[in-house]
Amino acid sequence: LLHTESNTYFINLINQLILLIESIILSKEYKKFDKSLDKLIEAIKITTPDFSLSNYKYFVYDSFELRILMNMSLVLDEIKSIEQSLEIMEFCMQIVDPNEKLYPKICYNLSYTYHRLDIHESALKYSDLGIDYCMRHRDYNGLNLLYFRKGVAEYGLGYETFMDSLKKCIYFCEILDQNKLKDLFINNCKKFYNIELQL
């Protein structure tokens, strides 16, 4: 596409996509988080040349740049601190359009981050926001993840409804034919929370 495209906007977008994919591979496959972050910064600088991690709040981002910024937050969690990761993810949440497809992904990431900080009220809030988006837009693909986060947050808060949420997580895995993910959720419930999911 780069050899056939002449529109600058599409050339920039393709280059950003390439760098984002390279970053994800470096992070997920090779655990090279510093190099992964460098790729993400390089990607965002294509359209925001003055970008840095110290001045990111001063720019306006389109939806794809916001996706890059969200991924930066995830990588920073590995190499800097959960607090810096949370700060950037909260910023993403403030500027994302609530009807944007990226919205429930940011909700999920915030819910998980707050879970790790043992702030279960916020973890529940963001999982509920993500679930609400998915229901309103009939986008069921991420519901299993969001219901898992919701159930764990409810469990952390001592709410009796936690089992209902976790069962919904498993049911959505079955509907979406995600059996490996279903087994992972069941195993994680037992391993980390001593919860036996009886379906």
Image (cartoon, rainbow, N blue to C red):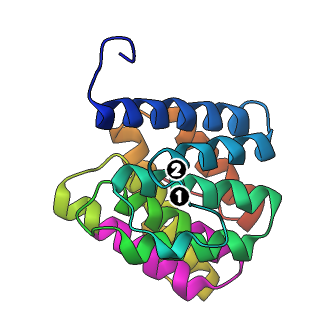
Residue 1 screen position, x and y as percent: 35, 15
Q: Residues within 10 Å of mark 1 (few under 14, many from 20)?
A: many
Q: Secondary structure at mark 2?
A: helix
Instruction: Name the mark on residue 44.
Output: 2
Q: Report which quarter residue 165 is drawn in.
A: bottom left
Evaluate if marks 1 and 2 touch, with contact meaning CB atoms under 8 Å apart. yes
Say if the magenta span includes residue 44: no
The residue closer to the viewer here, 25 or 198, is: 25
Q: Amino acid at mark 1?
A: Leu
Residue 64 screen position, x and y as percent: 39, 49
Residue 20 screen position, x and y as percent: 54, 38
Q: CA distance from mark 1 to mark 2?
A: 8 Å
Quickly name the residue at label 1: 69
Q: Report which quarter residue 36 is drawn in.
A: top right
The residue closer to the viewer here, 91 or 98, is: 91
Question: Which numbered disc, 1 or 2, marks the residue closer to the eye?
Answer: 2
From this view, report whether residue 158 is shown above or below residue 197.
Answer: below
Q: What residue appears at the point 18 percent right and 57 percent down from the top-left corner?
A: 137
Q: What residue appears at the point 54 percent right and 78 percent down from the top-left corner?
A: 123
Q: Which region of the structure is painted magenta?
A: 111-132
Residue 142 screen position, x and y as percent: 39, 51
Say if the magenta span includes residue 126: yes
